[in-house]
Image (tube, grey):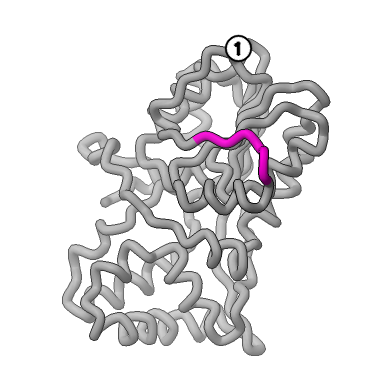
Amino acid sequence: MALSSCGKPPDDSPLSATPQKTWDAGLYDSTHSFVWRYGAELIELLAPQPGERILDLGCGTGHLTHRIAQSGAQVIGLDRSLTMLAEARKNYPGMPLLAADATRMFFARPFDAVFSNAALHWILDAEGVVRCIARCLRPGGRFVAEMGGKGNIEQFRAAVHSALDALGYPEGKNWNPKYFPCAEDYSALLEQHGLRVRSAVLFDRPTPLDGGENGVRLWLEMFEGVTLNRIVPVHRELFVKRVEDTLRPTLFRDGKWSADYVRLRLLAVRE
């Protein structure tokens, strides 16, 4: 799916066609824990208070939901992935968790805050989820989030697309779309739905990958599973090798891979 220079889906894009992903929750926790570990500092921006009602949107395997709950807040974790929620229930039995689509969620009681880490860039219907977030918050309630922003994994994406072209899958560029907006576009979207933006910061976060020499392979298995599953088995190893060869000159140092992450961190308050 083509994106504008600021990462905004074009008007004719199939916004409702968010790809159905099957997440490997065990792989996520074992070799991609950096996703939620980096999100721990976002909880400081949230500043949860005892007794507050908070929604963790895209809670994954529940680690940050649990940390928020340790503040004394009443937290509900929400995710679309049943495999992620199953792992969260195993990690934290008794924690309130809900399987739901973020673009259709509705709650009878409003929240004091909605929190989201590393989830919103997977939701192509950005306006749909922002509309629901605004509806979930009480007046004065806050929205605290971090997501992939403009420029996120540009080298990874280019390497994946190059490998797909070389192997005869030019249509593969549309198999696993993501939404990486700039601060201006996402701030404007929030403001349109009554969320006054207090801060919106786009910043580089080069991120070391676990797995040593296998770091890129494991990253592809986790985050490009949709792509790998559509490549015929005989091509998969060659695909991974081509991606590694493209990225190695810039993202492999001293036996360890890193990813060229760019994050967008947001704080907004409902009017």
Res. 235 image quadrant: bottom left
- Compared with 174, 236 (above or below) is below
Q: Check if residue 94 falls in the magenta segment.
A: yes
Res. 64 image quadrant: top right
Residue 21: % across, % down: 37, 53
- Compared with 162, 91 (above or below) is above
Residue located 26% across and 62% down the image: 173
Residue 264 visible in this rendered orientation of the protein: no
Residue 117: % across, % down: 60, 45
Residue located 67% across and 14% down the image: 140
Question: Range of the magenta residues?
Answer: 93-98
Badge 1 element = loop
Identify the image quadrant of the C terminus.
top right
Q: Check if residue 129 falls in the magenta segment.
A: no
Q: Residues within 10 Å of mark 1 (few under 14, many from 20)?
A: some
Residue located 63% across and 11% down the image: 139
Q: Where is mark 1, residue-wise?
A: 271
Give, as a three-letter code, the residue at label 1: Glu
Residue 137: % across, % down: 59, 18
Q: Is residue 268 left or right of residue 81?
A: right
Q: Nearer the viewer, residue 205 or 28?
A: 28
- Compared with 59, 164 (above or below) is below
- Compared with 178, 197 (above or below) is above
Residue 93 visible in this rendered orientation of the protein: yes
Residue located 50% across and 74% down the image: 218
Q: Nearer the viewer, residue 127 or 105?
A: 105
Q: Nearer the viewer, residue 142 or 225?
A: 225
Residue 87: % across, % down: 57, 53
Q: Main secondary structure of the magenta part?
A: loop
